[in-house]
Amino acid sequence: MSVLFSGVALPTIGAAAAGKALFKLFQQAGVPLESSLLSHVPTFCASSLLTDWHRQLSQEWFLSCQSLPLREVPALTPLAQAKALDSALTKLPLLHHVVQHTHASSLQKARTALQQSEQAQLQGNAEAAQYHALTAKQLLEEAVFNAHERLAKAQQTVLSKAVVDSLQEMGYQVRQHQNEQGTALWGVKGGQGIAVVINKDGSLQADMLGFDGLSCQEERQRLLAQLAEKGISVYQKASIVHGRKSGGQLLENSLHLARQRRLSVPHALLETALPKRQQRDRLRQRQLLVWGQKIRL
């Protein structure tokens, strides 16, 4: 009997190993993690950080719209957007910390441009206010976008290494394949196999084959325990005991694709679990990530 499960892997604060995992993640991102920030990040996940950002930005956008006469002077809309971006950033200490270390110059330029825009608005010069606000908005959007991407890539790297190390410690031979969407790992030990696919947002899917009885669940718990020792807690969203020694839907589809297209198993796993999305231009990609789907500009 084998099992298919999915969840979110989070470096957590509490035990010494957990703290080290979080520090490794930020070290990988090239950002020092100050102890004063730990109270703000009991756990870390790139997708959760983005959710918090969108929630805060939505509130600040509403307040900015109330503070400016946008109906009478639509040219002030970029000023409202820039003010919302800056206010939201200052109210999320972790993201603000990352941006300060990775885009210090851009952040300073953005805030200078924002001040110039506000001064122009007070002087009744809507055209100048719009010009400086657009500069501030672009710089702030790019800084937030790049900071999130940096953290997401670091998260993917740290989680992948933790899973590889854990599987190897359990006696598995591990192969992997990686692209912009995520990382796929395929561990083999005798006639047994464990497949793990890690999305860049921190979510993961896993499938197992070759196990008899309830030994699959015991092996899953061993893997989760190994990850916990490295400071990675997996919050399981779903678990299906599919009862097929040949593997669940993820492995069944991936092994078929591997044979059909002569791909390695990790490559096929990634193609199956995380199909490539249509490429968007960078501006559109930045807009969607920074502002999300629900904030109406």
Image: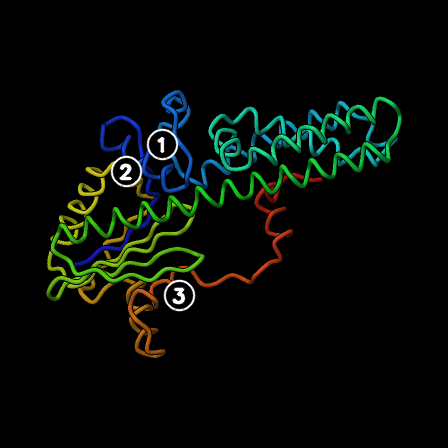
Compare residues 288 and 19 and report the one nearer the observer: 19
Counting labels gives 3
Rendering coords of residue 22 (x, y %): 33, 34
- Marks 3/2 in contact by CB < 8 Å: the verdict is no
Residue 219 relative to residue 43: left or right: left
Q: Which residue is mark 1?
A: 43
Rendering coords of residue 48 (x, y %): 45, 37
- The residue located at (51%, 61%) in the rendering is 277
**Is 96 located above or below residue 249 in the figure?**
above
Q: Identify the colour scheme used.
A: rainbow
- The residue located at (34%, 67%) in the rendering is 267
Dot 2 surroundings within 10 Å: few (below 14), some, or many (20 or more)?
A: many
- The residue located at (26%, 57%) in the rendering is 207
Q: Determine the secondary structure under disc 1.
A: loop
Compare residues 220 and 46 and report the one nearer the observer: 46
Q: Determine the secondary structure under disc 2.
A: strand
Q: Which residue is mark 3?
A: 271
- Marks 2/1 in contact by CB < 8 Å: the verdict is yes
Q: Which residue is mark 2?
A: 233
Instruction: Name which residue type carries label 2.
Output: Ser
Rendering coords of residue 19 (x, y %): 28, 30
Q: CA distance from mark 2 to mark 1?
A: 9 Å
**Is 184 located above or below residue 7 in the figure?**
below
Tell which circle, 1 or 3, labels the residue nearer the N-terminal end: 1
